[in-house]
Image (cartoon, rainbow, N blue to C red):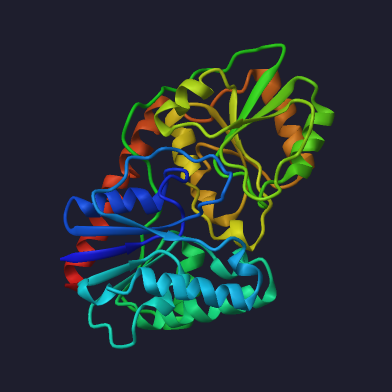
Amino acid sequence: MKLLYLMWIDWNWIWQRPQILADHLSADWDVTVAFPHNLISRTKLQKNPYPAKYRRIYVVPFYNRSSVLRAFMSSIIKWSLRDIKKFDAVWVGHPIFAEAIPEDYKGKIIYDCMDNHGALASGEAEKKAADALEKELIARSDLILVSGELLKQKIIGLRGEDQSVVLVRNGYSPGSIHEPGKGELKESYKLGYIGTISEWMDYTVIQDSLEKHADIEYHLLGIVAGNNYRKQERLYYEGVVEHKELYNRIREYDCLVMPFQVNEIVLSVDPVKLYEYISFGKCIISVFYPEIERFGDFVYFYRTAEEYSALLEELTRSGFPPKYSAGQQKEFLSENTWDSRYLTVRQCIEDME
């Protein structure tokens, strides 16, 4: 089978679900990966090994700021994918590609839904356009994969319940597992965050904690998207770190955190970083929302800035011990690998053929 794999992040963005699944699919089928590339972006990206077959879709800067630029971007996508009919199947990672699939396309369409795209829109016009494209894509897809329960319920609400909507959560890439320690009392503690630094970061909670706790500092590792940089004492931006080098960079950190605002975007997210945090064997703190309740044996949850501050007070007194044992860590990670997730994906595709 010849599969065209369409993803809407640069291949060299943080290594996550789109790249991982493309890599797995390429082992079983003839896969061509297409992804956006912004020639004038100043964002420093990683250097991920490229797939054997790939093509770049050159992105118009600020294409989502006007209907004219969106139409122009749509034309670029259609031109870049003008040979789409030669593929037996199309994997769609974002609704923006819906218009590029001709009405008379005879192949299979697979939609991998891992975000609430309407919530990610920057304005009402963009949200309306994203929702319309996604509705069209959902109606046309032969198989829909979702990364979380909330996304599944959203799609079932639009499509109706059937066996073509399958929950495939994110996972852990097998590698070195670092056993959890016992915590260590120190004069000061390093709290780390790994991932994209965007509008979902709760800087109010971060700033409040820095004001109340003189013995902590934050180190943020990842891409800063848009204008989401804040200048603050004891808040350090470490930039992009190659995935294989992550543990060496966070080895001395006492705790890994996920301080997000709980909004429409975050409520739908099954965060890859929590799987990775567990593999690093560190103490973990995260804001609570229903999608991640199943991480409760591993993560210290908070709901408000006051709860977060009280949790920090408690954990600094005990040296930030991980909540979980080595046995719990090993069992959880073995049950939640990307390899096991892919077995589900492959079976769904084989059943569809």
Residue 192, relative to residue 291: is it above or below? Answer: above
Q: Residue at x 59, y 27 (%)?
A: 255
Would residue 346 be seen by someone viewing this image from the given angle? yes
Residue 268 lies left or right of residue 144; in this view the side is right
Residue depicted at 54% across the width and 39% down the height = 44
Q: Residue at x 72, y 23 (%)?
A: 216
252 shown above or below 352? above
- Residue 331, given in percent of the width and then of the height, sits at 34, 36
**Left or right position of 284 against 215:** left
* Residue 159, image x, y percentages: 42, 82
Residue 323: x and y, percent? 54, 30
Asked if 64 appears above or below 210 in the picture, the reply is below
Is residue 160 visible in the rendered structure shown here? no
In the image shown, does 35 or 282 lie closer to the viewer?
35
User: Which image quarter is the N terminus in?
Assistant: bottom left
Considering depth in this image, is 40 or 140 the residue closer to the camera? 40
Q: Residue at x 66, y 66 (%)?
A: 122
- Determine the residue located farthest toward the bottom in the rendered image: 104
Quarter occupied by the C terminus: bottom left
